[in-house]
């Protein structure tokens, strides 16, 4: 699987149920039956990708909301999205595909 880039477009994959519990987002994949705790910031990312958005737009949004450098945010967001992608929880499209 290729690494996610800032120009890629990311969105939630269909077939997942997400809910807030104690300020954190928990999710269940209907397809696999697995549960995931996305945490507070992971939950914020999940909300932000309800509609397709570029990774760079997502990073910009998060750096405006949280006290984090662009470099750290980029690394963390890409790592998080890579993890979601490995579980088939997100759809990643190259910008040129849109």
Image (cartoon, rainbow, N blue to C red):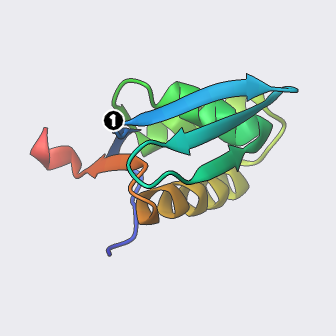
Q: Left or right of 62: which side holds 1?
A: left
Q: Residue furthest right?
A: 22
Image location of residue 60, percent across then percent down? 58, 34
State the SS at label 1. Answer: loop
| Pick the front one: 28 or 94 | 28
When asked about the image quadrant of residue 2, the answer is bottom left
Comparing 21 with 60, the one in front is 21
Q: Determine the residue positioned at 62% across, 49% down.
A: 35
Residue sitting farthest toward the front: 33
Q: Position of residue 40 (x, y in %)?
A: 78, 35
Q: How many tags in the picture?
A: 1
Q: Going by the image, does 50 lie left or right of 7?
A: right
- Residue at 58% x, 63% y is 79
Residue placed most toward the observer, 45 or 60: 45
Residue 1, relative to residue 60: is it above or below?
below
Which residue of the protein is positioned furthest toward the left in this rendering?
Answer: 97
Classify 10 Å Cα crowding around label 1: few (below 14), some (14-19), many (20 and above).
Answer: some
Quadrant containing the C terminus in the rendered view: top left
Q: Which residue is mark 1?
A: 14
The answer to whether one can see residue 8 in this image is no
Above or below residue 97? Residue 83 is: below
The N terminus sits in image quarter = bottom left
Image height of 95 relative to 81, above or below:
above
């Amino acid at each position: 699987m290729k690494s996610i880039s800032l120009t890629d477009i990311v969105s939630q994959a269909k077939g997942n149920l997400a809910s807030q519990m104690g300020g954190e987002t928990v999710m269940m994949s209907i397809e696999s039956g697995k549960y995931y705790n996305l945490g507070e910031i992971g939950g914020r990312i999940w909300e932000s990708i309800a509609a397709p958005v570029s990774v760079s737009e997502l990073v910009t949004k998060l750096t405006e909301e949280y006290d984090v450098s662009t470099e750290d945010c980029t690394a963390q967001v890409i790592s998080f999205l890579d993890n979601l992608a490995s579980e088939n929880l997100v759809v990643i499209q190259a910008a040129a595909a849109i």
